[in-house]
Amino acid sequence: MDLLSLGLRKSSPLRVGHPGIGQPCVLCKRAIRAGDETGRVPEPDSEDLAVADGPICHWTCIENGLNRLRQRGETTPGTTRRFLESWADAFNRQAVVGGQFAAYTSEADFILKNGRPFEAAPLPRGVRMGRPRECFRNAATLALRKPNLYTYVEGYAVNRWIAMHTVAHAWCVGSDDYAVDPTWDEGTEYFGVAFRHDYLRRVLKSRRDYGLIDNPEMDFPLVTGAHRADEAVVTRCQESA
């Protein structure tokens, strides 16, 4: 259980005079006392690992709460594919009615036609976890730093802590065909598209943010067909070559 990857950090036992003493734990509502080990819950928009000014909690309350979430966070096989198929189907119907004829009707359509499922595995030796909630940056950095070992993949996946949600995500794939995820250690149900290193470099030089498929800065070139899939995507045969 890597709570730091979720933006959570445990304190040393609080000493008398610490400003957190006397404040209510936001989870159990009991007062924080001297000697308690505590943690700060990150604000929704915070990217700061230290979360020095976030709400304070007993560390045991954080661990117990997340364990309960994990126990409920079971997914059925194919969860991400079904999510993408439902999304793509809705946009396919709209495209027929509206007479739209882009290369793909949606991001989901692009992912389904060019992607595939990936199985999760523990991080290999030599790969460290990146910053929480920066999956696109973490995966791109790993793929470009070690191009002979890893290929960048972008799509959707499920985090077992919040298994009711399928979310946009990025990871890498190694020669053994397993997902190498430098952002989540609780990921599952990965479904995504593997991209060529030269395409990844080219797009990242042309935009201010990370991400290849959801790319509004360049008017979604993979979905519209402005960027050809066969020049951007790595096929399974190419991955294993």
Image (spheres, rainbow, N blue to C red):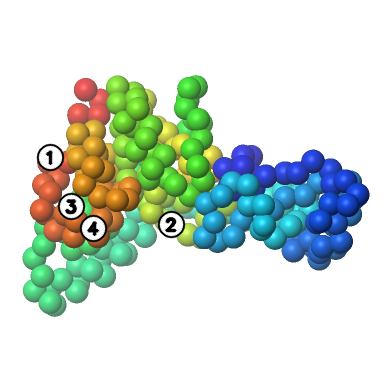
Badge 1 or badge 3: first in the primary sequence? 3
User: What's under tag 2, amino acid-wise?
Assistant: Thr
Place residue 175 in its image quadrant.
Answer: top left
What count of labels does the image hold?
Answer: 4
What residue does disc 2 label?
166
User: What's under tag 1, amino acid-wise?
Assistant: Glu
What residue does disc 1 label?
231
Distance CA(mark 3)–CA(mark 4)? 12 Å
Query: Does residue 106 appear to the left or right of 128 in the view shown?
Result: left
What residue does disc 4 label?
217
The residue carrying pointer 1 sits among few (fewer than 14), some (14 to 19) or many (20 or more) residues within 10 Å by Cα, namely: few
Q: Is residue 70 visible?
A: no
What residue does disc 3 label?
222
Which type of secondary structure does the marked residue at label 4 adopt?
A: helix
**Label 1 with label 4: CB-CB less than 8 Å:** no
Q: Nearer the viewer, mark 1 or mark 2?
A: 1
Badge 1 or badge 4: first in the primary sequence? 4
Place residue 202 in its image quadrant.
Answer: top left
User: What's under tag 4, amino acid-wise?
Assistant: Glu
Establish if 141 lies above or below 59: above
Which type of secondary structure does the marked residue at label 3 adopt?
A: helix
